[in-house]
Image (spheres, grey):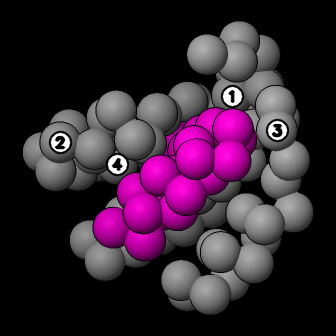
Amino acid sequence: MAALVEESAAVATSPGPFIVDINGLNFMGCCAFAVLAAESERCRARGVALRLVSCDPAVARVIQACNLSAVLPLHPTVDTALATAVA
């Protein structure tokens, strides 16, 4: 999974975001959140914001419990992720 995320993120260019929509997933292990958090940091270094999309409250709880809110901003829809101003 890490290689796929890294390859996909490499296509995103500044100032645009890299949006990862996980709404269709039934399960996502903790190591997947770690992969996304690490990629978010790499994206940030290139001026790209990784924005995670999920309307699942369990995803929000995992992000909060793992203290990843700063690196994995969560949005309920792709539209809201796209509408977020570049920081």
Type of residue at label 4? Answer: Val
Q: Which residue is mark 4?
A: 59
Q: Nearer the viewer, mark 1 or mark 2?
A: 2
Q: Residue at x 42, y 63 (%)?
A: 38
Type of residue at label 2? Answer: Asn
Q: Nearer the viewer, mark 3 or mark 4?
A: 3
Q: Residue at x 64, y 74 (%)?
A: 5
Kindly state the secondary structure of the residue where label 1 is placed: helix
Q: Is residue 82 above or below residue 13?
A: above
Q: Quadrant of the N terminus?
A: bottom right
Q: Which residue is mark 2?
A: 67
Closest to the observer, 10 or 84: 10
Do the residues bearing badges 3 and 2 touch, measured as CB atoms within 8 Å? Answer: no
Type of residue at label 3? Answer: Ser
Looking at the image, is mark 4 or mark 2 earlier in the sequence? 4
Kindly state the secondary structure of the residue where label 4 is placed: helix
Task: Give the image quarter of residue 80.
Answer: top right
Q: Which residue is mark 1?
A: 81
Q: CA distance from mark 3 to mark 2?
A: 26 Å
Q: Residue at x 62, y 87 (%)?
A: 3
Closest to the observer, 77 or 68: 68
Q: Nearer the viewer, mark 1 or mark 4?
A: 1
Q: Is residue 44 visible?
A: yes
Residue 87 in the magenta stretch? The answer is no
Looking at the image, is mark 1 or mark 2 earlier in the sequence? 2
